[in-house]
Image (tube, rainbow, N blue to C red):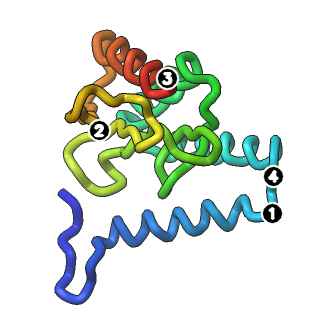
Amino acid sequence: MATKKSDDASFTAEERAAMKERAAELKSTRGTKGAAKKEKEAQDLKDKIAELPDDERVIAQKVADIVAEEAPELDPKTWYGMPAWARDGAVIVFVQPASKFKVRYHTVGFNDGAALDDGSFWPTAYALTAMTKATEAELRKLVKKAVG
């Protein structure tokens, strides 16, 4: 469960840490452009996945593999300290490890740029507790659909 918000703070400690990570991400690529920026962001993603606890690392790496195979046009990066993939700088898909916010399960999420629209109501985040063959197949379909 996420750390309880104190009476004098509007964000949990984990949320504040994520915001600090986002500021550091932006600062670390300031002045870097083109291929050099993409290479640094890709390395940052690999480093972030490597830092995860074993069970989370396996899942995050599998998501990274799926995105690389199904949506190679997306650029790997980190986003608020989480593994993410973007188009033109806008995050399309991300993995929120359970340990990051001290919650029960990982989340694979899709942002506004993802083409998941299905009528007037559709999910944009999925709880993920294990990477089974069935889960992998569904995730592959979602990633393909998300990039249009």
Is the residue marked by circle 4 packed among few (<14), some (14-19), or many (20+) residues within 10 Å?
Answer: few
Q: Amino acid at mark 2?
A: Ala
Above/below status of 95 relative to 136: below
| Picture disc at residue 33 | 4
User: CA–CA distance between discs 2 and 3?
Assistant: 17 Å
Q: Amino acid at mark 3?
A: Gly
* Place of residue 119 in the rendered image (x, y in percent of width and height, measured from the top left): 24, 28
Q: Amino acid at mark 1?
A: Gly
Image quadrant where one finds the N terminus: bottom left
Residue located at (46% from left, 19% from top) = 144
User: CA–CA distance between discs 1 and 3?
Assistant: 31 Å
**Mark earlier in primary sequence (2, 4):** 4
Above/below status of 29 relative to 17: above
User: CA–CA distance between discs 1 and 4?
Assistant: 6 Å
For residue 42, side relative to residue 69 (left or right): right
Mark 1 sits on what residue?
31
Residue depth check, mark 3 versus mark 4: number of the one nearer the observer: 3
Residue located at (56% from left, 47% from top) = 90
For residue 21, side relative to residue 107 (left or right): right
Residue nearest the observer in this picture, 145 or 121:
121
